[in-house]
Structure formats: C-alpha cells, structure tokens
C-alpha cells in the first residue's frame, strides 16, 4: 500500500467518519505532516500524521469530544506504540480502562479497536506506527542473522506505566519541529530507536505465559469480577476474593490477570476512577465526598490517583465537563 493509499484508504475515511476534516495548511505539529481538524460541532482539536513511504507513520493527537463517543477503527497490518499524556476512556472488547501517562501498543491487522472516549478530557498522545515493509522486509534485510520477533515483542509491552525510555523518546518526537532532509533523518532515527527499545525490553523481560483455565475457573473469575463491580468502593482483601473464587491467592491473581489483562488492584482502580468521573461531572459533591464515595479515605490520595489516570486533577476535570454547573 503506497503512502497516498494509506491516507486515502485508511486515515481519511476513519477521521472524516469521526468528525475530522483535512487542514493541510495547518503546521502546528510540523511542516512535514498532514493535519486534520475536528469539527466544532463535535469537539475541538487536531490529528497530525507524518508518513515515510510505506515504512512508518508518526502520529500526534490533541483533541476532545463534546460528548462521550464510541471510536472504532481497524488499523492495517502494523505495529503501533503510543504514549498517552492525557486520556479518559475504556477499551470495550475486552473491557479495560485506558489511562493517562501510559505507553500502549496496538497490533494492526487483527481485531478492530473499539473504544469509549469520555467527553471534554483531551486525548493528548504521540505514537509511532511501523508497517510490514519496515519490520518484515527492511529490518530483516539489514539484519538477516538476527532472531526478530517484532509482533510478540510489541504484544508483550501491551499497556504499561513503566517504560520511561519510550516516554522520553516519544516526547522528543512530539516536540520536534524540522523540515526537509533533517526532519526525515530525525524521524527515521526515532523509529529505529523505538523498535530497539521494544526489542531490548522483550529480551530482558520474556513474556509470562497465560495460565490455562478450565471452564470452571473462568466462571469463578467471572464471579469475582461481578463481586468487585458491586463492591469496588469497599475494602476488598485478597483473602475474601480468594474464598469467592474457591482458589488460592496465587492462582487467583494469575487467572484474573490472564482474563482481564491487569491485576486485581488495577481493575479496582479502573472501576473507582470510572465512577469518580461520573460523580465529578454530574453530581454536586465535593472532591472529598467523591473520594469517599468511590472508596478513598484521603481526598489528596484520590486526587493524585485521578490525575495519574486522566492527566487532570478532579477540579480540572469538573470544570472541563461542566460538573459544577
């Protein structure tokens, strides 16, 4: 697929379907890329892409919607890695909260990505998307004797808040402004560096094999999940959850992560933050009252967690979503 076809066949339809229109004269993220602007009736902000032949893309997002929006897209075959500086929403299949200040990979060419994006909170992110011509053809020609497992390496990263080297690299890409051959060489070098960081992480931290679960085990984890959904604001000691699951704590933790892709603690935080967003945007409660309602005794600790997950303080979120009105 050529660069022109990538834009015309993939990004233009996806973006215009979600309210974006081309704005080629806009160079706020750099003169080398193409920019789309979100219609004022839908939200505000921009989506910028730089293409290098059929090898890779650099993408910078800074936009938000006026209302909660379901955003569905199917990436072409590719390996994508993105740093989210600000975000509020969930993946829907399977359900998982997407948080701010995290690095996330997407494997294109498989199942479509289905997200619920919450209103008002800006999506501020920067990502690199490598196409098969880069990681299957170019790199294998350059390093024919090396054992490359790029797809598995990217799957291992998944979603993490612990990849500082990648965060630094992607922030450099976001803030770079250049033109001509200098920009082309800069972006090309950052793509190679990003790939090397993923491969180094993969070699140092081999993937943990998911446990094989029986149908009975799955039903028990479903029971634990339902219990957490109903009691997320309460104290939930692991021993109690273990009794509900009828399995030891070690097996429970491994089985839960195998199904949900996150730890029990992370899942509880996801449910609490989701409820907190609703209360902040629709209820006349103080931040301290919201904190207590979702299970935190300390308003300051709640505010710290909320900011780490959305990129905003509770008061900033309330102002953006007009929750004080």
Image: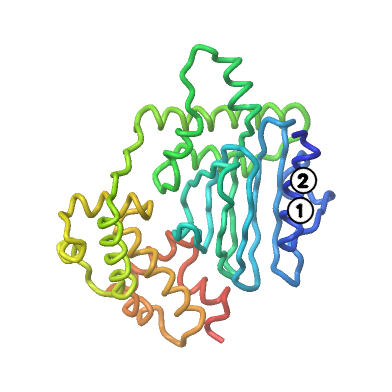
Which circle marks residue 68 in the picture? none
Identify residue for label 2: 9
Q: Is residue 297 left or right of residue 31?
A: left
Q: Nearer the viewer, residue 121 or 112?
A: 112
**Which quarter of the rendering shows the N terminus?**
top right
Secondary structure category for the residue under label 2: helix
Q: Nearer the viewer, residue 252 or 285?
A: 252
Residue 175, by quadrant, is top right
Question: Measured from the top left, where is residue 50 in percent x and y?
Answer: 72, 40
Question: Measured from the top left, where is residue 114 in percent x and y?
Answer: 57, 58
Identify residue for label 1: 13
**Residue at the spot 28% in from the left edge and 60% down from the top edge:** 221
Which residue is situated farthest in the right direction here?
25
Question: Measured from the top left, where is residue 287 in percent x and y?
Answer: 40, 78
Secondary structure category for the residue under label 1: helix
53 in relation to 69, above or below: above
**Residue at the spot 42% in from the left edge and 47% down from the top edge:** 160
Q: Is residue 237 left or right of residue 150?
A: left
User: Are the two marked residues, 2 and 1, in contact with CB atoms closer than 8 angstroms?
Assistant: yes
53 in relation to 45, above or below: above
Question: Measured from the top left, where is residue 241 in percent x and y?
Answer: 20, 64
Q: Is residue 199 left or right of residue 51?
A: left
**Residue at the spot 56% in from the left edge and 60% down from the top edge:** 115
**Which quarter of the rendering shows the C terminus?**
bottom right
165 in relation to 26, above or below: above
Q: Is residue 2 left or right of residue 167?
A: right
**Residue at the spot 47% in from the left edge and 77% down from the top edge:** 278
């Amino acid at each position: 697929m050529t660069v022109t076809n990538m834009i015309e066949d993939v990004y233009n339809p996806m973006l215009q379907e979600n309210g974006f229109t081309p704005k080629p004269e806009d160079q706020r993220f750099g003169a080398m890329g193409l920019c789309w602007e979100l219609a004022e009736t839908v939200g505000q902000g921009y989506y910028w892409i730089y293409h290098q032949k059929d090898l890779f893309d650099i993408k910078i997002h800074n936009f938000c919607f006026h209302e909660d929006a379901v955003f569905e897209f199917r990436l072409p075959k590719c390996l994508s890695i993105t740093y989210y500086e600000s975000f509020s929403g969930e993946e829907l299949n399977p359900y998982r909260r997407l948080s701010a200040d995290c690095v996330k990979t997407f494997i294109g060419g498989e199942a479509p990505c289905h997200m619920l994006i919450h209103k008002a909170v800006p999506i501020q992110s920067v990502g690199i998307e490598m196409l098969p011509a880069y990681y299957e053809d170019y790199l294998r020609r350059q390093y024919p004797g090396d054992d490359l497992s790029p797809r598995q390496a990217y799957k291992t990263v998944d979603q993490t808040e612990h990849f500082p080297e990648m965060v630094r690299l992607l922030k450099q890409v976001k803030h770079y402004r250049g033109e001509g051959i200098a920009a082309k060489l800069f972006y090309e070098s950052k793509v190679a560096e990003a790939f090397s960081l993923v491969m180094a992480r993969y070699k140092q931290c081999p993937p943990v094999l998911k446990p094989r679960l029986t149908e009975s085990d799955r039903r028990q984890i479903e029971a634990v999940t339902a219990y957490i959904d109903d009691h997320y604001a309460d104290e939930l000691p692991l021993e109690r959850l273990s009794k509900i699951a009828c399995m030891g704590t070690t097996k429970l933790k491994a089985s839960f992560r195998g199904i949900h892709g996150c730890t029990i603690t992370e899942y509880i935080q996801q449910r609490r933050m989701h409820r907190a967003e609703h209360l902040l945007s629709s209820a006349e409660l103080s931040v301290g009252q919201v904190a207590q309602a979702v299970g935190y005794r300390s308003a300051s600790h709640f505010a710290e967690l909320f900011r780490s997950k959305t990129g905003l303080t509770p008061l900033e979120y309330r102002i953006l979503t007009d929750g004080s009105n």
